[in-house]
Each structure stands twice: as C-alpha cells, then as structure tokens.
Amino acid sequence: MGCSITSGRKVPCKSAVGGIKTIYFADYGTLGDATIVAGEITGVSGTPDWFQFDVKGNSSMETAITSSRENGTTFYDTTLNMTLTFQDKATQEELKLIAHARPHIVVEDYNNNFFLVGLENGGDVNGGTIVTGAAMGDLTGYTLTVNAQETAPPYFVTPAVITADASAVQIDPTA
C-alpha cells in the first residue's frame, strides 16, 4: 500500500495571521529545475527575473483540493486575488503583460511564508477590474484574479529563491 499516512498534527498556538504582503511574478519557464527538499523549494537552476508587487488588505490566496475516487485523480486549484491601490500607466502596462502571460508566482504572507504558485503550469489571469470607484473612499486601482492548476499544492519556498534584486514598479502619485 503506497498511500500511507506518515504523521499527525497537534493544535498549534494562535499566533498566525491572515493576509498577503507581497506577490512576485517571473516569466514562465525561467525557473529551470526546482530543488525540492521535504516539501520546500530550496533553489532553482534557472535565473528568473522577479517583479515585485506589494499589496495590502484585500488580497488572498486559496487552494482547493479536487480528488476523485472514480477517476483516481487529485489536483490542486489555486486562486490568487490581488488588489492594487492607485492607478498609474506603468502598473497598467505591467498588468496587461501579466494578463497575456502564464507566469510563475511567489506569494509572501504576513507569517513570512513564501509559496510558489504555478511551478509546472504557470498561472493564468482569468479576471480582474480597473476601477475608479464612485465615492471618495472607494477603491481606485486594479484587481486581478490568477488561477493555477497543479498536481501539488503551492510549495513553500526559501526566500533565497527570490533574488534580492526583485524589481518593483515605482509609483509617483504626484505625476
């Protein structure tokens, strides 16, 4: 029997928090081979250029597990929702490129965990908005929904996989 359970889990302390801090995008196929040790990606053979998007508030990541006894299949469907406040030309141009691409994505949460979404198949943008809002307190910015279907859930990633020189769009609200 090859599907043996190997350990259990006790109830952890109540020290975790929700939310996403940063999302990094890299062009599909630039990771090369991933080194996976005990369920964590510790390195990649490629040299991807990572592009950093800082988010706050309404951004989330959720992975649904789909398993069928009848078909003998299991896969993981990850949905990443990101909200970017403020509209500017540079961000809009980058989001157009992301929408047409199939990027690899790393999500950093507020617990200092890093997760790689779309290791094998990349992520696909399947929705989003460019919104100005109606009232003074409404969102003016962008929302984006990215979906990735993989044979494994998003892997934990050591931060070293994201190069220290990840570039970010610089926004000048006075321009």
Image (cartoon, grey):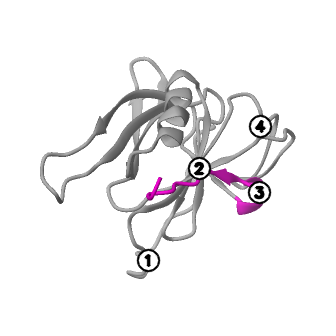
Q: CA distance from mark 2 to mark 1?
A: 38 Å
Q: Upstream in the sequence, badge 4 or badge 2?
A: 4
> Regarding mark 1 in the picture, which secondary structure is present there?
loop
Q: Which residues are magenta?
A: 158-175
Amino acid type of the residue tagged 3 in the rendering: Asp
Amino acid type of the residue tagged 1 in the rendering: Pro
Left or right position of 98 against 125: right
Amino acid type of the residue tagged 2 in the rendering: Val
Q: CA distance from mark 3 to mark 2?
A: 13 Å
Q: Tag 3: Cα neighbours inside 10 Å, few (<14), some, or many (≥20)?
A: few
Residue 97's place in the image compared with 140, above or below, is above
Res 85 label? none
Q: Which residue is more in the foreground, 10 or 146? A: 146
x then y, percent, for residue 77: 44, 34
Residue 113's place in the image compared with 156, above or below, is below
Residue ID for mark 1: 12
Residue 47's place in the image compared with 53, above or below, is above
Give the residue drawn at x 71%, y 61%.
159
Residue ID for mark 3: 165
Q: Upstream in the sequence, badge 4 or badge 3?
A: 4
Q: Quadrant of residue 11?
A: bottom left
